[in-house]
Amino acid sequence: MKIIEKVEIDTVTDVMCDVCLCSTRVANDGLEFATLQAHWGYGAKHDGERYELHLCESCFFSTVANLKQERRIQNLFSDEFGIEACEQNEKFGLIATDDYFRDDRGSNL
């Protein structure tokens, strides 16, 4: 026997970018956003603090570009920062390509 009742549930209807405050909704009625998060543990200056930021595609890649630049600056005079390190910097954080269905069948780097 089926028992049917109306149930009210909370659901995410949109995610706003924490930087530009724009919606992350895309054309197919889905949400496309990145999450930057941290949970600082014992011994850290920010012990017990948790952070979670949601970024739209544009703000995410601006943040990645900023981090790449910071990495270049931090290692500018390092002996290990040669041509190979510059190539690695271009793929900074990238772990897969052609993973359209998020099933890990794309090419892993």
Image: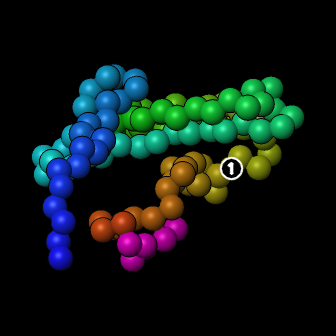
**Identity, as a three-letter code, of the amino acid under mark 1:** Gly
Q: Is residue 84 left or right of residue 9?
A: right
Look at the numbered disc 1 and give the secondary structure of its residue: loop
- Along the viewing direction, whichever of 77 and 11 lies nearer the viewer: 11
Asked if residue 53 shows in the view, the reply is yes
State whether residue 12 is above or below residue 47.
Answer: below
Residue 12: % across, % down: 30, 41
Residue 85 is one of the magenta-drawn residues:
no
Are there few (<14), some (14-19), or many (20+) residues within 10 Å of tag 1?
A: few
What residue is rendered at 72% in x and 36% in y?
40
State whether residue 6 is above or below residue 40.
Answer: below
What residue is rendered at 71% in x and 46% in y?
81
- Along the viewing direction, whichever of 36 and 83 lies nearer the viewer: 36
- Along the viewing direction, whichever of 94 and 7 lies nearer the viewer: 7
The quarter of the rendered structure image containing the N terminus is bottom left
- Give the magenta range: 103-109
- The residue under label 1 is 82
Main SS category, magenta section: loop
Q: Is residue 63 left or right of residue 48?
A: left
Q: Is residue 53 left or right of residue 105?
A: right
Residue 105 is one of the magenta-drawn residues:
yes
- Along the viewing direction, whichever of 69 and 2 lies nearer the viewer: 2
What residue is rendered at 77% in x and 39% in y?
41
